[in-house]
Amino acid sequence: MATAAATAAAADVPSCRDLPAAVSAFADAFVDFAVSGIFFPSTPTPSPPPPPTPTTFLPSPTRLVAIGDLHGDLPKSLSALRLAGLVPPHDPTSWSAGPTLAVQLGDILDRGGDEIRLLYLIRRLAISAAGQGGALLPIMGNHEVMNVSGDFRFATPQGLREFSAWAGWYRAGLAIKRRCARGGDGGDPPPKNPFLGIPKEFPGVKPEFWDGIRSRLAALRPDGPIARRFLADLPTVLVVGDSVFVHGGLLEANVEYGLERINAEVSEWIRGERGANAVAPEFVRGRDAVVWLRRFSDGVNCDCQRLEGVLGMIPGAKRMIMGHTIQTDGINAVCGAQAVRVDVGLSRGCGNGLPEVLEINGGGTNVRVITTDPAEAWQYRKQGAEKAAIATAVKEKKGEVKEGLALLVRESHGLKEVQAKAA
């Protein structure tokens, strides 16, 4: 009788077989809030899996906004978002622009200490925008490609500390999930540990930065939790109506290869479907890659005839909107407004430029620059020393000067393409 009663009582106690989804959701929410201070809305039913290929073509919205490189600077990024009217003054996680479609031109990572918080904020805003019929769509920049490749030359000590803090909370979340890992009562299988196979020491780098580098590798390598969650579904090239958005630029070979194909291959690489140590796809590597090209964004003497030819290969395309190259005089256009350059060096780690955004209305017929109100612009005016710093930042963007983590490494021990063994 006692045995039967004990069996009946045990049957009334929920087991891990009943709890894994709830425990996993709690652990994820716990980590999200600890890392970013942001809660993501819960859904009563499991959310559908992301599409296998990022979006490449979208129709023209009633209002289209373009924001340039952010580089790990949360306060300055919020200034740009508010300038564009995308968020209200006192609630940065709430979308206030209705059906506006906003494109952020990549380079969220590097040069600052708010990289993870920016990724969380942009994703939370994207969810909020979708609920109002709008969209916030970041695209891939060269610094996202570099970090997934293990190239941390432009990471900062503050950025490494942010990733170390993320790693501590992520491990805590893993420990919670393991409480319901598959065992005698049939819970979920043990969660994957992204830190397995990653070195704990990095010769040539100061030991105080080892944990940050290890955490960054775990988070951002192919199939890493930050890379898969926040980067894998980003397009590398996005065409919205008659505007082509790309971080660096497009050449004829890119269009011939296929914009959707480029997006699909980069996404597959970031999701780890090509292997944990696979190199980045060809069209995001090298001087003429779509995230590295400066042919149409550097200076006023662009090859306008070639640009016109490239745009002519994309049905309906009238302009190419690019980031990547700092425009010290603000957002501008050349080649009869076919080349629009929106990287204003916004981040304090990369010029502390005056916040500006591009706005396109009327299905592409009305294009204007929204710039900071003169009453606020004084705080961004540059004195002699600051102008020299901006000039250095421009050279750094072009790879002519070392900065960030590159300064922490002896010349003979570069961190480029650091690889981790597959778990």
Image (cartoon, rainbow, N blue to C red):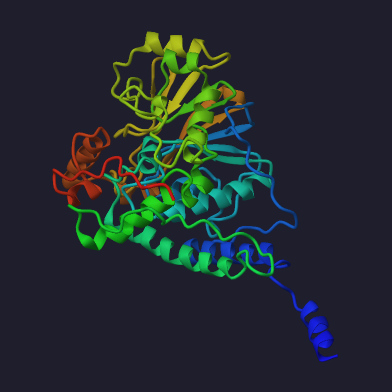
Q: Position of residue 107 (x, y in %)?
A: 39, 40
* Residue 20 found in image quarter: bottom right
Give the side of residue 13 with respect to residue 109, left or right.
Answer: right
For the point 59% across and 32% down, the residue is 53
Q: Position of residue 71 (x, y in %)?
A: 37, 45
For the point 68% across and 41% down, the residue is 133
Residue 193 shows in the view: yes
**With respect to residue 29, does 134 lie above or below?**
above
Residue 290 shows in the view: no
Which residue is at the far bottom? 2
Q: Nearer the viewer, residue 287 or 345?
A: 287
Give the side of residue 214 with respect to residue 117, left or right.
Answer: left
- Quadrant containing the N terminus is bottom right
For the point 30% across and 59% down, the residue is 200
Q: Position of residue 95 (x, y in %)?
A: 60, 50
Give the side of residue 413 with respect to residue 13, left or right.
Answer: left
